[in-house]
Image (cartoon, coloured by chain):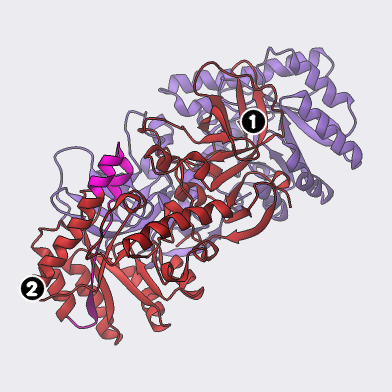
Chain colours: A red, B purple
Amino acid sequence: MLIKDLDTPCLVLNKKQVQKNIDAMQCRMDALGITMRPHGKTAKSIDVINLFEPKHRQKITVSTLKEAEYYFDNGVKDLMYAVGIAPCKLPRLLALIRKGAKISVVLDSLQQVAFLSQCGHDNNVEIPALIEIDCDDHRAGIVPEDPKLIEIGRALNEWPGVCLKGVMTHAGGSYDCQSIEQIKNLAELEKQAALKCVERLNQSQLTCDVVSIGSTPTAMFCEELNGITEIRAGVFMFQDLVMHGLGICETDEIALSVLTSVIGRHELKNWLLVDAGWMALSRDRGTQNQSIDYKYGQACDLAGVPIRHLLVESTNQEHGILAFSSPPIEPLKDTTIGTILRILPNHACATAAMHNQYYVTQDNKTISEVWQRVNGW
Amino acid sequence: MLIKDLDTPCLVLNKKQVQKNIDAMQCRMDALGITMRPHGKTAKSIDVINLFEPKHRQKITVSTLKEAEYYFDNGVKDLMYAVGIAPCKLPRLLALIRKGAKISVVLDSLQQVAFLSQCGHDNNVEIPALIEIDCDDHRAGIVPEDPKLIEIGRALNEWPGVCLKGVMTHAGGSYDCQSIEQIKNLAELEKQAALKCVERLNQSQLTCDVVSIGSTPTAMFCEELNGITEIRAGVFMFQDLVMHGLGICETDEIALSVLTSVIGRHELKNWLLVDAGWMALSRDRGTQNQSIDYKYGQACDLAGVPIRHLLVESTNQEHGILAFSSPPIEPLKDTTIGTILRILPNHACATAAMHNQYYVTQDNKTISEVWQRVNGW
């Protein structure tokens, strides 16, 4: 099947480019002497994860238990559920452990240790947990200096039904960096936050098998990782306009795009209407505060080549409005209703989340495979 | 099953409130002497549409052909596909017509008439089309004065394989109104734009069986609809914070909420972390420019009662950060990890789009039914 014959809107994934993006990261990790625990939340597809070398896909990070169940059923046995554990997640967590999954959870409170311990004890299993560290004042976790670190570590070590697996942190603030220098500094901060916690735990005779850090920006710029045992990152597999804005990739390294049909023209305004609205693109406006604001995405021709300054200016549910962001406004007279375009996403995780499958191409002309995604919870 | 025992995050729908919202709109339409063509794109569920009285659900509006196929298979025979028609949609449109669907399309160009005519002629069917009118400079359609109106009308009337069904317009700009007065003015403008086109077409001996207008805000405030044959609107079934900001509803009339668990507490910042991120809430920020900015949504207790000033301050994929928007900051000490909360959505269409089903309650305590949604294209 040819890309141009697909029903629009739909999600097109360039497998060759995904492979290149993965290879580049693996090469970097190999040079640093570290293995990955890739984040499965961007792709939500075992077919994408299978593009990694075996050693870099022995273990995986997930953001939902549905992903955990899916990746486990597809052969990945070592899983980290990287969202703070809540009591309602325990039955499914337990079911995974009983099926043989080596799944760890993350937490940052004694209350979480208590209900995990109760659950593990009552069910005669030992649930491994990582203490979440807040390295950049961004979201969850305790700061490296927090006295609770040792309390939580001791509880995980001593209470029944649980065990201390290690520490993890995520420099989510890296998405808001304004320069490579800032990203490098944050990568160092992320590493130091984790190492500081390991040191403090060690001083209390508490050991960490896992010292886990990572985000795509910091993974791209971290240097020398002594003491770190694994790197988590996800969006680098596809790349996107936010990563481009951060200086992480070129636009031609973005592997994901939304295929769309022109459904109207507004000649006075030099607008094109397309059938990719926020339902197909997502409402993500991640480039809004970057030096180039791509609005709801960059328009490309059918081959995936960006059309200079043509952006998705605004969206409704099933309508997108394309307009030139910068004068001189070029005429759109060559496009007619039915012309097929492609839109590069602001945020690959968010755009992919609006779709149930990838139409996979290797040559930007034909569709060779269709890969399913595991959405939902 | 009790709401508090559901896995989070998930979508909860209060059926009694949906019924009240639908009844209020039906009552208004009955008083105006007009029938509805409810928009199926918000609910994407026949169970919701079946809450309408039979006369107000004889015909329906859809935003995708997948919705059209689904509603047709579930007994709704009269459909309007209200997104400008593109060539790649023709095979599925044709299949629906052959199965007996009375489906009309919308268009605003001679090019669209030409490919529809070719398709209808080649397949020995007559495809009914409405001319889309731009009443508020918002999106698609031709302005009422455009000479193309008559050209397109004549082509639909004379060319084989197509027929002129009427005109349709949508005052999408009503979402950006700042007052009820503005909405009323726009409702009048929407109506007058449609009637002006009918008048012009009639002067050229072209007749309109269907004169279709509507959006939730204008449907709530339109007055006297002589000459209009149907009203389209969708979001009123659920209501949302954007509609609340427009003065259309109270927050306790919002029937939709996202159920979420507290997964972390940040005492210094007085933050709660919850497991509803943008994956569960959507990235929609529709209240951003309204007088009250609800950020990513209003937090409520388990019973659905808003917690004053507690908003979803920011979101990541599977994390939401709740914080008080206004001092004095109240302590969050009563909530613990595992506390279940509910989040009212900014934009019901966008939030519901992130989920595959509704957990339906009548008493805000127990789940009586699970209703499926028809997402995708």
Residue annotated with mark 1: B33
Along the line of sight, the residue nearer the viewer: A23 or B183: A23
**Amino acid type, residue under disc 1 in the picture:** Gly
Q: Callout 2: 10 Å neighbours few (<14), some, many (20+)?
A: few
Along the line of sight, the residue nearer the viewer: A291 or A35: A35
Residue A346: where, in percent of width, then height? 46, 40
Q: Is residue A265 above or below residue B47?
A: above
Q: Callout 1: 10 Å neighbours few (<14), some, many (20+)?
A: few
**Amino acid type, residue under disc 2 in the picture:** Ser
Residue A64: where, in percent of width, then height? 40, 63
Q: Is residue A230 magenta?
A: no
Along the line of sight, the residue nearer the viewer: B70 or A289: A289
Give me the C-alpha separation between circle 1 and circle 2.
78 Å
What residue do we see at 28% from left, 67% from top?
Answer: A229
Q: Is residue A173 magenta?
A: yes
Residue B349: where, in percent of width, then height? 50, 43
Q: Write down the quadrant of residue B165 in the picture.
A: top right
Residue B312: where, in percent of width, then height? 31, 46
Mark 1 belongs to chain? B
Residue annotated with mark 2: A204
- Describe the element under mark 2 as helix, strand or loop: loop
Q: Are marks 1 and 2 in contact (CB under 8 Å)?
A: no
Image quarter hosting the C terminus of chain A: bottom left
Q: Which residues are magenta?
A: A159-186
Q: Nearer the viewer, mark 1 or mark 2?
A: 2
